[in-house]
Amino acid sequence: MVGGNLGKPFHYRSSKLKTIPEKWFIQNLDHFNPGNDQKWRQRYFVNEDYYKGAPSGPVFLMIGGEGEASDKWMTQGAWIDYAKVYKALCFQLEHRYYGKSRPTVDLSTKNLQYLTSQQALADLAFFIEMMNEQYKLSDDVKWIVFGGSYPGSLAAWMRMKYPHLVHGAMSASGPLLAEVDFKDYFKIVDEALATSSNTCGTAVKQGTTQIEILLRHMIGQRNINEKFKLCDPIDQNINNTNDVSNLFETLAGNFAGVVQYNKDNRIGKGKSNITIDSLCEIMDNDNLGPPIDRLAAVNTLLLSADNQTCLDYKYDKMVKQYRNVSWDSETSEGGRQWTYQTCTEFGFFQTSSYSPQNFGNKFPVDFFVQQCIDIFGPKYNKDFLNASVRRTNTLYGALNIDVTNVVFVHGSIDPWHALGITKTQTLGAPAIYIDGTAHCANMYPKANDDPPQLTAARIQIAELIDSWIRL
């Protein structure tokens, strides 16, 4: 499953930017049980360079999300450009259970009970209160929160739940609607491929069909092993439906990950130069052979970008990694934690349920529900998930959220816009829908080749922030 986390901002002069030291805040473990007085240390960053000491602020707060907080965001990005203009004090608070903000000794399912969006919002509220005290800010101080992806949702929810603390919110690419079967995700991936080439999606579909045909017999299966550089031979696992589902979902994820972050000015893991156009050039290149060979070429490109020598599709191996509860495990970087949040609050499962689409139908919603059960236990079944998603939408209002001083920003290429507000519903909470941009694109540092509609969106956001500060 492709998460939606915000990457590190790319800046051509990043080596000359100052390093911001990490700080620590004593936080409550459980905000909703007065009888639990356990505490833990939460990491945050502060940049006072642009602040002129006015007790009424403004104060800008970048909300941490489903990954490690980066000090790079403290000196670059659109919000820093705004901070320079409005002379804002800037904070970033890392989300509980991610990065170095570790409330419990490990990531056992029992300990993850304290990992919820509601606890995260309360963390922000108590942090704001403490910083108001520490910096001797006045009662009318104006805090503006910024968030992209899941923190984009948190930003809007923060303004809704704690309006006495938060004066305004910039919510970028926030999925406000929790949904178990996020079937529109790959529909939008298909549409995004079509923006590059009319034939790209068709080639993907033909390649996927050719894989399905080859998987029906031994010689074809061995052919797949070689073409797609599989770590384990598929001919020995062909009767394991979870392995087959995982293979197809991984190959679809090759395209989804590139589409979601297309041309977004982030620091990538070797992938930042791989775009929708790059993939479609491969898929449209007849010289590479039939469509299945072009799919294999895309797979090789992305394996190389991730410094991988083979494609690991084994379901049991994946589940074993996600069941590791140690902070030292690979999945402790956020994989286990975010999977827990999807299994207990949001769903967001990017399934193959939408029809017709180009990536086949081998990873339905039940495949993802099974992961919740296998990783966290039998309680986390479909009934539990449906109830959890319904609860989340009841708590926050989903797409019927009632707020003011919030701007919802989405890009048309980003599949997550399907779960967000893309049209202005009330004047106090406008939506900006940017044609041709991807996930959280407006948050990254500006670049010379940014499309004019992205530049215009950043200017519009600045004007809204200005109006909130003047209120």
Image (cartoon, rainbow, N blue to C red):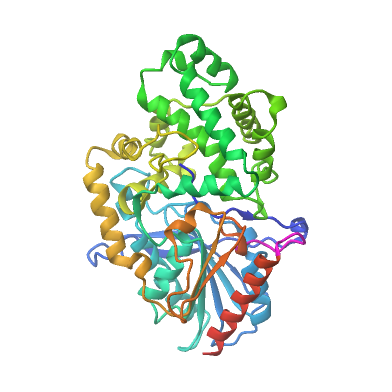
For the point 46% across and 23% down, which residue is it?
Answer: 212
Q: Quadrant of the N terminus?
A: top left
Instruction: Please identify the quarter of the rendering in which residue 241 is found.
Output: top left
Residue 68 belongs to magenta span = no
Asked whether the viewer can see residue 328, the reply is no
Q: Main secondary structure of the magenta part?
A: loop
Instruction: Please identify the quarter of the rendering in which residue 397 is found.
Output: bottom left
Work out whether 23 lies above or below 352: below
Closer to us: 299 or 186: 186
Closer to us: 169 or 458: 458
Residue 216 in the image: state x and y as whole percent.
43, 16
Residue at the front extreme?
Answer: 198
Q: Is residue 215 left or right of residue 392?
A: right
Closer to us: 236 or 46: 236
Work out whether 384 lies above or below 90: above
Residue 385 in the image: state x and y as whole percent.
27, 48
Q: Is residue 366 left or right of residue 290?
A: left
Asked whether the viewer can see residue 132, the reply is yes
Magenta-colored span: 443-451
Q: Is residue 186 left or right of residue 282?
A: left
Residue 340 in the image: state x and y as whole percent.
36, 46
Residue 194 in the image: state x and y as whole percent.
59, 46
Closer to us: 112 or 450: 450
Residue 450 belongs to magenta span = yes
Picture mark count = 0
Residue at the top extreme?
Answer: 219
Instruction: Please identify the quarter of the rendering in which residue 281 is found.
Output: top right
For the point 53% across and 84% down, which residue is it?
Answer: 468
Work out whether 194 lies above or below 221: below
